[in-house]
Amino acid sequence: AQSVTQPDIHITVSEGASLELRCNYSYGATPYLFWYVQSPGQGLQLLLKYFSGDTLVQGIKGFEAEFKRSQSSFNLRKPSVHWSDAAEYFCAVVTILTGGGNKLTFGTGTQLKVEL
Amino acid sequence: ETGVTQSPTHLIKTRGQQVTLRCSSQSGHNTVSWYQQALGQGPQFIFQYYREEENGRGNFPPRFSGLQFPNYSSELNVNALELDDSALYLCASSLEVSGDDPWISSYNEQFFGPGTRLTVL
């Protein structure tokens, strides 16, 4: 079954520093991969997605992610973190359901803290 | 704001009770998915409804059930509540369309609501 792993439970960075959040996937074919952000008391907001094509994907809020098949990774990056980026970040992969629908399988998340 | 709304925002129940959570999909969306997010975990897929029928189910017992209405709003019902049912319940709506390529057309972005926080005492 498709799955994603986020090795880092918590990450702390200083405002203005660069950020990289790790995500490793397990899937035989080309996966559909996503990064979501969740602020306290909020639902999930889609940052970016990868389906195929260019392996460097640009998203909202200045985030980008790179798909690396050789490493089974889809890491999220941002060159300069803002205090408002403090939140929980989830990597997810799509699984097609037997009935023709689809579901998202999420990692356990990485909590980002930004020091001023 | 995604246009997906959920009610109530918070709910407290006792073990053994039953609960109904509600979701209003984004306008024009015909598919709704429900997820359970326990504290410190990623969301787990409960089930998906498409055109009022269950379209897929995750690893949840039958006491978790759902309904989707003709206006595409949805309910999640949980019977015989257990302490471990305490979680944030998220619904997500999407527009599923058929197409020539079942893989490409089988995924459409899911838009999430803010969730309902359920506490079971």
Image (cartoon, coloured by chain):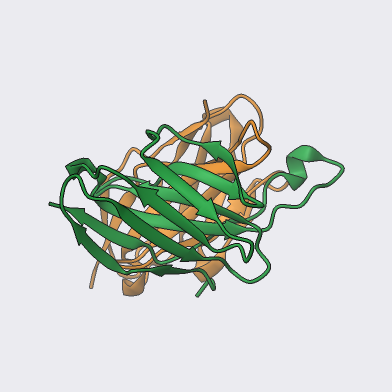
Chain colours: A orange, B green
Judge by depth and name the residue closer to the eye, A106 or A75.
Answer: A106
Q: Position of residue A15 (x, y in %)?
A: 30, 70
Q: Residue at x 38, y 51 (%)?
A: B77
Q: Residue at x 42, y 49 (%)?
A: B35
Q: Seen in the image, is B38 located left or right of residue B52?
A: left
Q: Residue at x 65, y 63 (%)?
A: B29
Q: Seen in the image, is A28 located left or right of residue B102?
A: left
Q: Position of residue A33 (x, y in %)?
A: 57, 44
Quarter in which the C terminus of chain A is drawn? bottom left
Q: Seen in the image, is A106 located left or right of residue A48?
A: left
Q: Quadrant of residue B62?
A: top left
Judge by depth and name the residue closer to the eye, B55 or B20.
Answer: B20
Judge by depth and name the residue closer to the eye, B73 or A15.
Answer: B73
Q: Quadrant of residue B80?
A: top left
Q: How many marks?
A: 0
Judge by depth and name the residue closer to the eye, A102 or A32.
Answer: A102
Q: Residue furthest right?
A: B100
Q: Position of residue A1 (x, y in %)?
A: 52, 25
Q: Position of residue A89 (x, y in %)?
A: 38, 54
Q: Residue furthest left?
A: B121
